[in-house]
C-alpha cells in the first residue's frame, strides 16, 4: 500500500538552509510534490519532480529524489521567517488516479 | 481567478446534527477532491470526482458521510448524524484532471462537533 512519511518538526535560524525529508513506499509513483500550508489556509503547490529525475532546482528550492531508496528531500536556501509553515510531501500513484497521497507534514519554524 | 471556494469557513454544531460543507471548484477544472485534515492522521483523501462522477470513495469513513457533485461548479460533503470525532478541517481541491495536474486547494472548513 501507499504510505508517505515525514519528520514532524524542523527548527532553523534565519539565513540557514532547511532540509525537509520524506520517504514513500510505492515504487510506482509517477510524480512527487511539495506543498506548503500557512496558518488558516489551504495547501499551495511549491514544486514537483517527475520520478525519472534526480534533481530539480527552482530559485531557493532544490528537490532531490533518490528513487532507489524512495527518498525525497526539499532544500530551502537562505531560509526566511516567511518560510515558516507546514510542508507536505505528496505522491501521485496510478491506483489513486489523479488524487495525491500526502504525508503528515513537517512544521518548519524559522527564528530570527 | 477566484480559486477554490469553500463555505462555511467555520462550523460549530452539536452531536447528532446534520452538517453540509460546500465547495465551488475552479472553473474549467474537471476533478474535485475532498480531504480531511487532523493532527493525528494528517491529510486523508475522502472521495474524488472526475467530470462530476465519483471515482473513489474508499476514504469515506462511514455511511454517515456522503458527497455529491450535481454539476461541474458545485459539490457538497454531508455528515449525518455528526459526531465529535468528525471534528477536523475539511479541504476541497480541484484540478484539470490530467497527469501532473496540480491540486488547487480551498481554505478549508473547520468543523467542530460538540
Image (tube, rainbow, N blue to C red):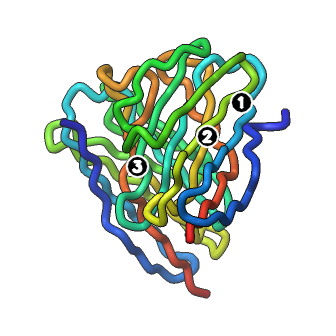
The quadrant of the rendering that contains the C terminus of chain B is: bottom right
Tag 1 subunit:
B
How far separated are the C-alphas under marks 1 and 3? 23 Å
How far separated are the C-alphas under marks 2 and 3? 18 Å
Sort mark 2 into few (<14), some (14-19) or many (20+) by Cα contacts within 10 Å: many
Q: Pointer 1 and pointer 3: residues touching (CB < 8 Å)?
A: no
Residue topped by disc 3: A89
Sort mark 3 into few (<14), some (14-19) or many (20+) by Cα contacts within 10 Å: many
Residue B25 has which mark? 1
Front: mark 1 or 3: 1
Work out whether residue B65 or residue B91 is closer to the camera in this orientation and state it.
Answer: B65
Q: Pointer 2 and pointer 1: residues touching (CB < 8 Å)?
A: yes
What residue is rendered at 75% in x and 47% in y?
B7
- The reply, left or right, for residue A20 in relation to residue A42 is left
Q: Position of residue A102 (x, y in %)?
A: 39, 46
Up-down relation of residue A84 to residue B89 (above or below): below
Q: Position of residue B71 (x, y in %)?
A: 71, 16
Up-down relation of residue A99 to residue B40 (above or below): above
Under circle 1, the secondary element is loop
Tag 3 subunit:
A
Tag 2 subunit:
B
List the single residue furthest toward the bottom. Answer: A112
| Discs 1 and 3 lie in a common subunit | no
Residue A76 has which mark? none
List the single residue furthest toward the front. Answer: B16
Under circle 3, the secondary element is strand
Residue topped by disc 2: B92
Q: Earlier in the sequence, mark 2 or mark 1?
A: 1
- The reply, left or right, for residue B46 in relation to residue B103 is left
Sort mark 1 into few (<14), some (14-19) or many (20+) by Cα contacts within 10 Å: many
Amino acid at each position: 500500500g501507499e504510505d508517505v512519511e515525514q519528520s514532524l518538526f524542523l527548527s532553523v535560524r534565519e539565513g540557514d538552509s532547511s532540509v525537509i525529508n520524506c520517504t514513500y513506499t510505492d515504487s510506482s509513483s509517477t510524480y512527487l510534490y511539495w506543498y506548503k500550508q500557512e496558518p488558516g489556509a489551504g495547501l499551495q503547490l511549491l514544486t514537483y519532480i517527475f520520478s525519472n529525475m534526480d534533481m530539480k532546482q527552482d530559485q531557493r528550492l532544490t528537490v532531490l529524489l533518490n528513487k532507489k531508496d524512495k527518498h525525497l528531500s526539499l532544500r530551502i536556501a537562505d531560509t526566511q521567517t516567511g518560510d515558516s509553515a507546514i510542508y507536505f510531501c505528496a505522491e501521485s500513484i496510478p491506483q489513486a488516479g489523479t488524487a495525491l497521497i500526502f504525508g503528515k507534514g513537517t512544521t518548519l519554524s524559522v527564528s530570527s | 481567478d477566484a480559486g477554490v471556494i469553500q463555505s462555511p469557513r467555520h462550523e460549530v454544531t452539536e452531536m447528532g446534527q446534520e452538517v453540509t460543507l460546500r465547495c465551488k471548484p475552479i472553473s474549467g477544472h474537471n476533478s474535485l477532491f475532498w480531504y480531511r485534515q487532523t493532527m493525528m492522521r494528517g491529510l486523508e483523501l475522502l472521495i474524488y470526482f472526475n467530470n462530476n462522477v465519483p471515482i473513489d470513495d474508499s476514504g469515506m469513513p462511514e455511511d454517515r458521510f456522503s458527497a455529491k457533485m450535481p454539476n461541474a461548479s458545485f459539490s457538497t460533503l454531508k455528515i449525518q448524524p455528526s459526531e465529535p470525532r468528525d471534528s477536523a478541517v475539511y479541504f476541497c481541491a480541484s484540478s484539470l484532471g490530467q497527469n501532473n495536474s496540480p491540486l488547487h486547494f480551498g481554505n478549508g472548513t473547520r468543523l467542530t462537533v460538540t
